[in-house]
Image (cartoon, helix red, strand yellow):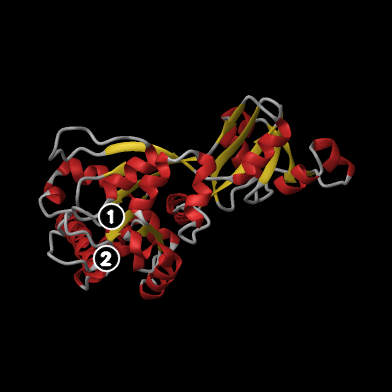
Amino acid sequence: MKTAIIGLPMVGKTSLFTILTGVHQETHIGSTAARIGVAKVPDTRLEELARLFEPPKVTHAVVEYVDMPAISKENLRDPAYVASLRVVDAFAHVLRLFEDETIPHEKGSIDPLRDLEDVEIELILSDLTVVEKRLERLEKDRKKIKNPDLDHEFDLLLKCKAALEQNEPLRQMPLDAEEEKRIRGFQFLSQKPMLYVLNLGESEAGRLHEREQEYRERLKRSHTSVTAVCGKIEAELAELPREEQQDYLASYGLRESGLERLISATYSLLGLMSFLTAGETEVRAWTIPVHSTAVKAAGAIHSDFEKKFIRAEVVNWKNLVDLGGYPGVREKGLLRLEGKDYIVKDGDVLVIRHG
């Protein structure tokens, strides 16, 4: 799963990408190339399981991030730039709330809601161009061929056009399963789930949760989420030894880093969750869509496990830790045998039995 970090110039998105992934900016300026990096999904459950089993290897789930050059009319006319946006699963739109006279805003003032709408309009206009071109093509094809599929597509794209012309992103347009399937191939930009990332100044760090809630109330939109970070604090935090990080966060009244919450919010927005495997060789988190079955979870580990699936042994990670391992949960009857249709829960520890 891939998330593009987008936004206007000078909002702090590249700094956040670097802190998230450890991938540093290249020295040349003005490139329209996207940069890719991965960030570990924070998971204290792995740490507790690792203390129990003491394996040589602990593997976190990861989220892939793409640092995109700033959204602009010029970039959205570049086919390579648009292609990079189309293939991602979601956007993290960084909105600047911090004041800094040494970093001028291109609009001359700080107004995150204005910036949000400016970027949204650019995505909508890009989609509208695609819709209008496809409708022209369909108009010609429908005159030559009588095909109900062409008629259905034409009608659906007319609905999309009407929404876009009202400056409504396609993620807010209600679609049934069949309609969703029909337009999936277009990879519309305004249809992608959107995480709004509020980048606060250091002076507002103590109000981070309050600001986050304020914008959640203001931005109640379908398939969107809001999280807040303070880029300056995150940069300083990244330089500290791990044992000092919690005290540093506490000095601002924070319990966890903004980037941890950003990664978790991305994971949630994409409809993902983790199940775990744990033993003496490795403790690991595996990424699967929410509501996945046990057989699909087995396939995330190895395709052979899915093909030759027999049963899954399932236990909640907390029970496994509290009772000191598999013998303890077996004794208490908390290790269950489940079939292929079992719906895996976040935090389940699975042992797959296969042929």
Q: Quadrant of residue 326?
A: top right
- Residue 227 coordinates in the image, percent (x, y): 41, 60
Question: Amino acid type of disc 1?
Answer: Phe
Residue 188 tag number: 1
In the shown orientation, is residue 264 left or right of residue 124? right
Q: Residue at x 34, y 68 (%)?
A: 173
203 up-or-down from 59: above or below: below
Q: Which of 44/145 is in front?
A: 44
Closer to the chain start, of discs 1 and 2, is 2
Residue 161 lies, in percent from the top left, at 22, 66
Q: Quadrant of the N terminus?
A: top left
Looking at the image, residue 114 lies above or below residue 274: below
Measuring from the top left, give residue 71's x and y in whole percent.
Answer: 19, 53
Residue at 15 percent across and 33 percent down: it is 28
> Would you say the residues marked 1 and 2 are in contact, meaning their CB atoms lie under 8 Å apart?
yes
Q: Secondary structure at mark 2?
A: helix
Q: Which residue is mark 2?
A: 160
Q: Amino acid at mark 2?
A: Cys
